[in-house]
Image (spheres, rainbow, N blue to C red):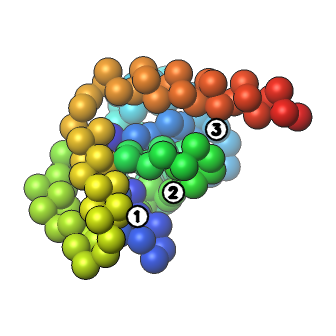
């Protein structure tokens, strides 16, 4: 679970779906440890902050319900992604859309609830993604 940042958007809670090196994919377990490595350190990236620029992550944003590519993004691990627990108090307190519509405030609230829901939600999201992938395959 991380906070992810895209240009033009606020920091948003997201779940890492896949972590890979920019030059070649690396298999990573749930704890963030690369196969054959000694585990994750700073930023949840194998090798720590110094190696973060060599990694990117595919994330699924919490609280989004578009059902398409807008629910996902690929972000660099060097400054546009931080562990959720590290900044939860700071970022959760700042509602980025305070002057915006009621729908945006509702989406922000849902994102925080999903982020704090834990691994049970992860299983539900996986099932949704599988159903979406099957539907897309049938259309093709």
Which of pointers 1 and 3 indicates the residue nearer the eye? 1
The C terminus, quarter of image: top right
Identify the mark nearer the N-term, 2 or 3.
3
Identify the mark nearer the N-term, 2 or 1.
1
On screen, residue 16 versus residue 117, left or right, reads right
Residue 25's spot in the image, x, y percent?
64, 38
Give the residue at mark 1: 5
Identify the mark nearer the N-term, 1 or 3.
1
Give the residue at mark 3: 25
The N terminus, quarter of image: top left
Total tally of numbered discs in the picture = 3
Query: What residue is shown at x 31% (from left), y 48% (from top)?
Result: 111
Residue 26's tag is none
Q: Residues within 10 Å of mark 2 (few under 14, many from 20)?
A: some
Q: Is residue 84 visible?
A: no
- The image quadrant that residue 70 belongs to is bottom right
User: In the structure shown, which secondary structural element does the residue marked by tag 2 occupy?
Assistant: strand
Give the residue at mark 2: 75
Q: Residues within 10 Å of mark 3 (few under 14, many from 20)?
A: few
Residues 38 and 129: in front is 129
| Cα separation between marks 2 and 3 | 15 Å
Residues 100 and 76: in front is 100
Residue 75's spot in the image, x, y percent?
51, 57
């Amino acid at each position: 679970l991380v906070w992810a940042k895209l240009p033009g958007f606020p920091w948003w809670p997201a779940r890492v779906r896949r972590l890979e090196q920019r030059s070649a994919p690396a298999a990573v377990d749930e704890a963030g440890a690369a196969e054959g490595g000694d585990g994750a350190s700073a930023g949840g990236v194998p090798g720590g902050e110094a190696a973060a620029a060599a990694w990117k992550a595919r994330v699924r944003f919490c609280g989004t319900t578009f059902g398409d590519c807008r629910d996902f993004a690929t972000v660099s691990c060097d400054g546009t992604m931080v562990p959720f627990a590290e900044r939860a108090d700071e970022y959760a307190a700042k509602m980025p859309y305070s002057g915006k519509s009621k729908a945006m405030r509702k989406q922000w609230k849902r994102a925080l609830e999903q982020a704090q829901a834990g691994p049970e939600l992860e299983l539900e999201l996986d099932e949704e993604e599988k159903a979406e992938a099957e539907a897309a395959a049938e259309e093709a």
